[in-house]
Image: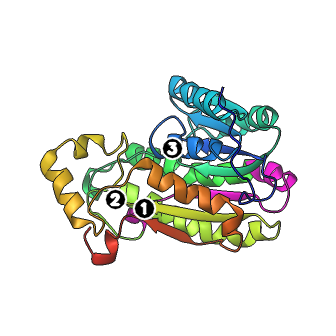
């Protein structure tokens, strides 16, 4: 077992406080769990795919020597979220961080989006973020001043796409939720921010990026000349959870390689 001895001075609040990561079994969520474990933070990996969640938790423990925990959980189920709090806190000792990275795409223009699709996208991407914050608030307060929350939004939360109606609404909603919650959470010295990725090498984007012409076009459009890796986004999330971001709250960090800065979307 590799025992990570990385300096922890940049970690917010209690450097040993655990972090719950939804969608932690793959993509940005997985990369975030590993990025946090690499600097010594315990993680609870939540994912609808229990096998993937278990695998990531085992990597965090075996490769970095941190406490790890996993739950097979559907974050569209409010009761399941509530029931997941105590096991996660018990496994990690305390929880001083929360990352909502679980998300679903829900493509379709408004005339093709029925009630079921709309609700399924908003439930996972947006409503779950509010429920998670509510049920973990006592644990975050108990962990002490400096606890932090990061919502994974998207550049689609800043700009619209007619083919992603529900997705854009849900991700824009996370930005509004972040701003609104910053006031209430700030009373307890808890910070909340959003990260807005662009095009990232994730399972959600895999079918699109598998088409060479589309990958090449998207890469050439970005000022940095490539699409993002999950690790690019995970490092930004880790920063927002860290003491280096101790006066940043209620805002969003766009991590897209300059994509929307030049109107490429």
Q: CA distance from mark 2 to mark 1?
A: 6 Å
Which residue bears the numbered disc 3? 31
**Residue at figure coordinates x 12%, y 51% from the top left:** 213
Q: CA distance from mark 2 to mark 3?
A: 27 Å
Q: CA distance from mark 1 to mark 3?
A: 25 Å
9 or 124: nearer the eye?
Answer: 9
202 or 235: nearer the eye?
Answer: 235
- Are the residues flagged by discs 1 and 3 in contact, CB closer than 8 Å? no
**Magenta range:** 136-157
- Are the residues flagged by discs 2 and 1 in contact, CB closer than 8 Å? yes
Lower position in the chain sequence, tag 1 or tag 3:
3
Secondary element at tag 2: helix
Judge the density around disc 2: few (<14), some (14-19), many (≥20) Cα neighbours within 10 Å: many
Judge the density around disc 1: few (<14), some (14-19), many (≥20) Cα neighbours within 10 Å: many
Lower position in the chain sequence, tag 2 or tag 3:
3
Which residue bears the numbered disc 2? 165
Secondary element at tag 1: helix
Secondary element at tag 3: helix
Camera-near label (1 vs 3) is: 3
**Residue at figure coordinates x 53%, y 48% from the top left:** 101
Magenta-drawn stretch contains 35 = no
Instruction: Say left or right for 55 vs 155.
Output: right
**Residue at figure coordinates x 27%, y 66% from the top left:** 222
Residue 13 at least partly seen? yes
**Residue at figure coordinates x 52%, y 40% from the top left:** 30
Report the disc number at residue 169: 1
Location of residue 241 in the rendering, given as x and y in whole percent from the top left corner? 66, 58
Q: Residue furthest top?
A: 51
């Amino acid at each position: 077992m590799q025992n990570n001895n990385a300096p922890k001075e940049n970690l917010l609040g209690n450097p040993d406080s655990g972090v719950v990561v939804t969608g932690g079994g793959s993509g940005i969520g997985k990369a975030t769990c590993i990025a946090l474990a690499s600097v010594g933070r315990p993680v609870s990996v939540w994912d609808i795919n229990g096998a993937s969640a278990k695998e990531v938790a085992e990597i965090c423990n075996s490769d970095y020597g941190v406490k790890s925990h996993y739950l097979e959980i559907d974050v569209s189920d409010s009761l399941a979220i509530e029931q997941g709090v105590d096991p996660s806190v018990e496994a990690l000792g305390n929880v001083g961080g929360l990352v909502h990275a679980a998300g679903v795409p829900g493509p379709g223009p408004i005339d093709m989006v029925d009630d079921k699709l709309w609700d399924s996208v908003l439930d996972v991407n947006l409503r779950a973020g509010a429920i998670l914050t509510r049920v973990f608030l006592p644990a975050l307060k108990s962990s002490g001043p400096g606890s932090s929350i990061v919502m994974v939004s998207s550049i689609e939360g800043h700009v619209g796409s007619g083919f992603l109606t529900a997705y854009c609404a849900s991700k824009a909603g996370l930005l509004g939720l972040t701003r609104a919650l910053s006031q209430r959470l700030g009373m307890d010295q808890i910070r909340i921010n959003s990260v807005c990725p662009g095009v990232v090498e994730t399972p959600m984007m895999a079918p699109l990026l598998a088409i060479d012409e589309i990958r090449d076009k998207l890469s050439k459009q970005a000022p940095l000349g490539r699409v993002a890796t999950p690790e690019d986004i995970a490092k930004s999330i880790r920063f927002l959870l860290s003491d280096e971001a101790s006066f940043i709250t209620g805002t969003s960090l766009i991590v897209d390689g300059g994509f929307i800065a030049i109107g490429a979307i």
